[in-house]
Image (cartoon, grey):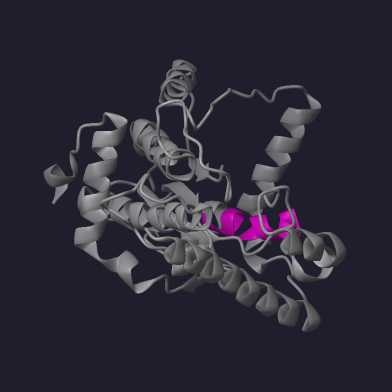
Amino acid sequence: MSLLSVALAALRVYAAGAAVILAQLLRRCCGGFPEPAGNNDSKARDVVRRIQEATLNDKVEFLYCDLASMNSIRQFVHNFKAKEIPLHVLVNNAGVMMVPQRTTEDGFEEHFGLNYLGHFLLTNLLLDSLRASGSPSHSARVVTVSSATHYVGQLHMEDLQFRRCYSPHGAYAQSKLALVLFSYYLQHQLSAEGSAVTANVVDPGVVDTDLYRHVFWGTRVVKKLLGWLLFKTPEEGAWSSVHAAVAPEMEGIGGHYLYNEKDTRSLAVTYDRELQRQLWARSCAMTGLRDTSDDVM
């Protein structure tokens, strides 16, 4: 990747962000982001009620997991399975954005290693728990959070680690593109095996969080001054994930890209089954997993 390519990657990412912010401003001026009707259903409210009750009774338990460490992910899965509890929903939401060039504990470029490979490994190691928890009438659900930057991302299969010429913007966009490809191929395999597990990917929009510390200073100024108007609140940003996780209309539905709780078409290349397969195989090799995708083809 040349220096020109690095500059173009940055321009594409900021252009994508600007387009989303403009769309959010227009929607804010036309009524804002009301809570989706589907989130008012009894199932969603029951989930919230159970969490609130557990919190009040000090019954919430947190298990540590560092997605930048393959060892930590494996230890987390071991600790979780030891509790012998069902797993109905897995939301892959952790991530870093446009960080300086650095690597994870395992030597992977951080965007690709944490944002993508960490979730790839975690999901695969928990699939048996998800399968055991799902049923024909109540599928277990995998919800993976990508972003609009995937539309300007490029998958560099010959240099997934951006070792030739690092671009924080290109690396971030690539990790979000990889998550979409992963989700679609995961759903393909789950459907082929007849599993009661679904996999969808969501786009939260541009959300007012602490994720912007490494972006262009002008963006940080805009966020500080106008974030209340241009950016979604964390709650609004989470609604698509909640919708994918508990909405009755998503029961048994997988392989979709959701934006503002609506089924949306992702970048054309994400539907390339051969590219999905290639990335899956490479990811298995990187994480030390056996590639069993051919077993269900």
Q: Residue at x 60, y 54 (%)?
A: 242
Residue at the extreme right of the image, as rendered = 225
Would residue 54 be found to the left or right of residue 82 on screen? right
Q: Which residues are magenta?
A: 233-244
Asked if the stretch drawn in magenta spans residue 80, the answer is no
Asked whether 13 or 189 is in front, the reply is 13
Picture coordinates of residue 128, whole percent (x, y): 33, 32
Left or right: 102, with 133 as reference point: right
Give the vertical position of 290 relative to 99 (above or below): above
Magenta span: predominant SS is helix
Image: 180 above or below 259? above
Q: Is residue 235 left or right of residue 247?
A: right
Q: Position of residue 15 (x, y in %)?
A: 58, 74
Q: Is residue 232 visible?
A: no
Foreground residue among 21 and 6: 6
The residue at 47%/34% (across/down) is 103
Residue drawn at the location 27% of the way across and 29% of the way down: 288
Question: Residue 1's spot in the image, x, y percent?
Answer: 37, 58
Of 266 and 240, nearer the camera is: 266
21 displayed left or right of 255: right
